[in-house]
Amino acid sequence: MSMLSRMLMSAGLSGIVAALLLSLVQFQWVTPLILAAETYEIAAESTEHVHAAETAFGHEHAEDAWQPEEGWQRTLATISSNILMAIGFASMLVGAYQLRRPSRWTSGLSWGIAGFTVFFVMPSLGLPPELPGTVAADLLARQYWWLGTVCATSIGLGLLFLQGHKVLKIVGVLLLLSPHLIGAPQPAMAESLAPEALQVRFIQASVLSNLLFWLVLGGLSAALAIRFDRTDLTHTRSSPEDSHG
């Protein structure tokens, strides 16, 4: 089995398993909170539509973009997007293993925590998870800040833990701090239709589900990478050429 095949197998299998686990946890912890928040959003939208009809006779509304309906459509869309996302993240981890190969599956947990920090913790310090009905800043500005935070955090962690030069470690710390010194884009007025208690529960559920996802993804991808490497090494040592002596 070629190195590329081993990487694809490790990333694909670990990504699917981690995505299915994440989907299960989301359906149990996260989705009920989102559905509860949507009831406040729907109630507010219906009130706005009534006022608009009273004050703007003859106004035509643009068609809403397609969204999956409740039930199997929403479930399938969630699972599919989670699988694609997880395989992408797993591919990044398996690629990183080629630079520093894990000696045991527990080494993958460290990489998982790093991924959790890069893609969830540090961006969430400026842009915490939000329920439907929460007023937010401009979407494009938030996307740029999120991407910049991810890049700065990944490079900063690499300089801190993957090399030994003190000056570069200082640069790594500055990179970790830089997005938050700049500040994430914020709305002119913070407002949420859902109660604050519901928002707090949503953040807690998001943190726990993402942490579990990254730990499983890191540990399983490392275990599979090690197993495929050993299997390939065993096949190489016992190749048919040894029997032609």
Image: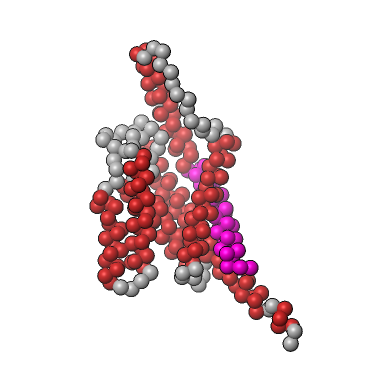
Q: Residue at x 48, y 53 (%)?
A: 213
In the rendered image, residue 188 lying in the magenta stretch gets the answer no
In the image, what residue occupies the spot 43% across and 64% down?
Answer: 110
Q: Nearer the viewer, residue 59 or 17?
A: 59
Snapshot quadrant of residue 76: top right
Q: Nearer the viewer, residue 200 or 68?
A: 68
Q: Residue lying farthest bottom?
A: 245
Examine the image and state in which quarter residue 178 appears: bottom left
Residue located farthest toward the right when viewing the structure as drawn: 244
| Image spot of residue 235 (x, y percent) | 66, 74
Up the image or down, 133 lies above or below 123; here it is: above
Q: Is residue 237 left or right of residue 14?
A: right
If the image is split into quadrants, where does the N terminus sit?
A: bottom right
What is the chief secondary structure element of the magenta stretch?
Answer: helix
> Does residue 30 lie above or below 238 as drawn?
above
Q: Where is 29 relative to 102, above or below?
A: above
| Image color mode | secondary structure
> Horizontal placement of 51 versus 239: left or right?
left
**Camera-nearest residue between 121 and 95:** 95
For the point 27% across and 56% down, the residue is 177
Q: Decide if residue 101 is on the left or right side of residue 47.
A: right
Image quadrant holding the C terminus, namely: bottom right
Residue 35 place in picture, x, y as percent: 47, 34
Horizontal and vertical percent for residue 59? 40, 16
Magenta stretch bounds: 1-29
Q: Looking at the image, can residue 220 be seen?
A: no
How many marks on residues? 0
Residue 11: in sight, yes or no?
yes
Residue 62 lies, in percent from the top left, at 45, 24
Q: Name the residue: 55% across, 59% down.
A: 11
